[in-house]
Amino acid sequence: MAFALDHVQIAIPPGSENVARAFYGTLLGLRELDRPASLAGRSGCWYDLGLHQLHLGADADFHPARKAHVALTTDDLGALRGRLVDAGCPIGEDVPIPGRTRFFTEDPFGNRLELIQLG
């Protein structure tokens, strides 16, 4: 039996899809996906990450993920950091990892995100 990652889901507060789209779509530059017709009418957003997807799902009992997090890779971490700083997003450093330049930020709901450039 083999496994592979299909998607990761992050919880967001109910009714916050427009705020999520502004952050994940506009600021980070992720491409939003159409959800299957069978899920029409449900709240949330889905984003394309190449071979994987990032799903944002509304949770009536929302609590931000402060330790658990998604790590996204990019080919221009410096430009992304600049956009996040200009937007007033928090930037946090952590222990260096060989072969990776990285930092942490939070989405507008307090969910922790790690952003990485490999190499």
Image (spheres, grey):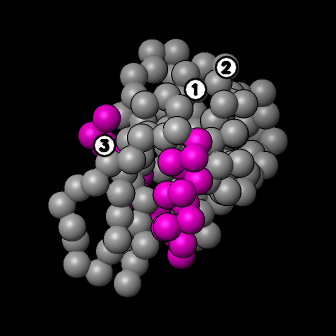
Q: Quadrant of the C terminus?
A: bottom left
Residue at disc 3, secondary structure: loop
Q: Amino acid at mark 2?
A: Gly
Residue denoted by label 3: 68
| C-alpha distance separating marks 1 and 3 | 17 Å
Residue 67 colored in magenta in the image: yes
- The earlier-in-sequence mark between 1 and 3 is 1
Q: Are marks 3 and 2 in contact (CB under 8 Å)?
A: no
Residue 84 or residue 54, whichever sits in front: 84
Q: Is residue 65 visible in the rendered structure shown here?
A: yes
Number of residue marks:
3
| C-alpha distance separating marks 2 and 1 | 7 Å
Q: Amino acid at mark 3?
A: Ala
Crowd rating for badge 2 (residues with CA inside 10 Å; few <14, some 14–19, many 20+): few
Q: Residue furthest bottom?
A: 119
Give, as a single range, the part of the protein colored magenta.
Answer: 66-87
Q: Are marks 2 and 1 in contact (CB under 8 Å)?
A: yes
- The earlier-in-sequence mark between 3 and 2 is 2
Q: Residue at x 54, y 72 (%)?
A: 76
Residue 45 or residue 80, whichever sits in front: 80
Residue denoted by label 2: 15
Look at the picture and state if 90 lies above or below 73: above
Q: Position of residue 84 (x, y in %)?
A: 54, 49
Residue denoted by label 1: 58
Q: Is residue 34 left or right of residue 107?
A: right
Q: Is residue 107 left or right of residue 100?
A: right
Residue at disc 2, secondary structure: loop
Look at the picture and state if 63 lies above or below 103: above
Q: Amino acid at mark 1?
A: Ala
Q: Is residue 53 left or right of residue 73?
A: right
